[in-house]
Amino acid sequence: MPAGGVAAAAGKRAAARRSLRRPLAFALLALSAAAAADGETMTGAHYAAPAERYGHFALGRPHEYARLVVSTDAGQRHSLALPDDEVFEDLAPRLVTLATGEPPELLTIVSQRDSGSRLALIGLRDGRLAISAQSPPIGTPMRWLNPVGVADLDGDGQAEIAAVSTPHRSGTLRIYRRHGQQLVEIAALAGVSNHVYGSPELGLSAPVTIDGRTLLVVPGSTRRQLRIIALQDGRLVETAHCPLSAPLTGAITLASGAQLSVGLLSGRALIALHDCPASK
């Protein structure tokens, strides 16, 4: 073959190799992008788009929102908009993990025009936010619930979700366990209240660990005592109670060891849990 023909054939082969490399490179980039999207982990979240369409405002204005915005470790932002008959009646989403090795999810409070509030877990998958599990709604509009926290209350390695439903009227502490796409109530105890209507303070109750055991500290219905509550054999049991000198209106925080700092109407005070009388 003449030299010119050899050169032309070589050029065609090189062009063919380049043309094969292009789609291969694009495919690898697409696979890489998909893997990055699948591997995204939520690192933060906030509510957006304050709304007036529900109008309960248990936490005061503007704490009813139409949209959730999430940031990830890949530097991405994702959002989830609720239907027109729902709002996030909440202060801030809670980043939680229910079991070791599971991806984090967001625990939120969703209120619906006809059925009131429910708990909703929101997850990120394939670059999209969606409700992954939820509790039954309270069933009455303008009825709200306030989470106590997420903790492994029975030591089985799977965290439960504790919340007080209708804390402004005959509140009930409810424990939920995830079963697929449902948050199923497994135990309940009446006579509690962990919120003052109209206040943005949501921290009037908390899980605490005492002597290696996780317990729930929740105010009684008048908020003049703290009830120390355990999940035992599938039941909620009050193990002790701590009288308060004034109604609880501020957050409960762990001061040191088994000592709590509590916000009372009269100011902050320290409560030593070991000094609280045992309940019968």
Image (cartoon, rainbow, N blue to C red):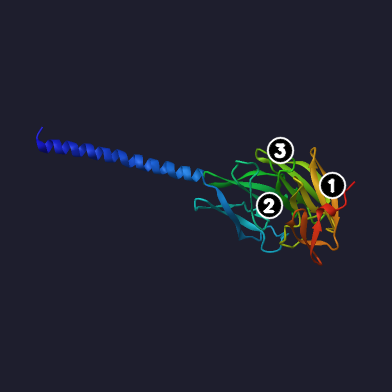
Observer able to see residue 68 = no
Which of these two is toward me, 276 or 237? Answer: 276
Say whether marks 1 and 3 touch (CB < 8 Å): no
Q: Which residue is mark 1?
A: 239
Identify the element where label 3 is drawn. Answer: loop
Residue occupying the far top of the picture: 1
Furthest toward the right, the residue is 280
Q: How many numbered marks appear? A: 3
The image quarter in which residue 65 lies: bottom right
Q: Residues within 10 Å of mark 3 (few under 14, many from 20)?
A: few
Q: Left or right: 188 with respect to 37?
A: right
Residue extending farthest to the left is 2
Label 2: which residue? 109
Residue 156 numbered mark, or none: 3
> CA gap, disc 1 to disc 3?
20 Å
For the residue carrying disc 1, how many other residues have a C-alpha within 10 Å: few (<14), some (14-19), or many (20+)?
Answer: some
Q: Where residue 93 appears, x then y in whole percent?
A: 64, 54
Kind of residue indicated by mark 1: Thr
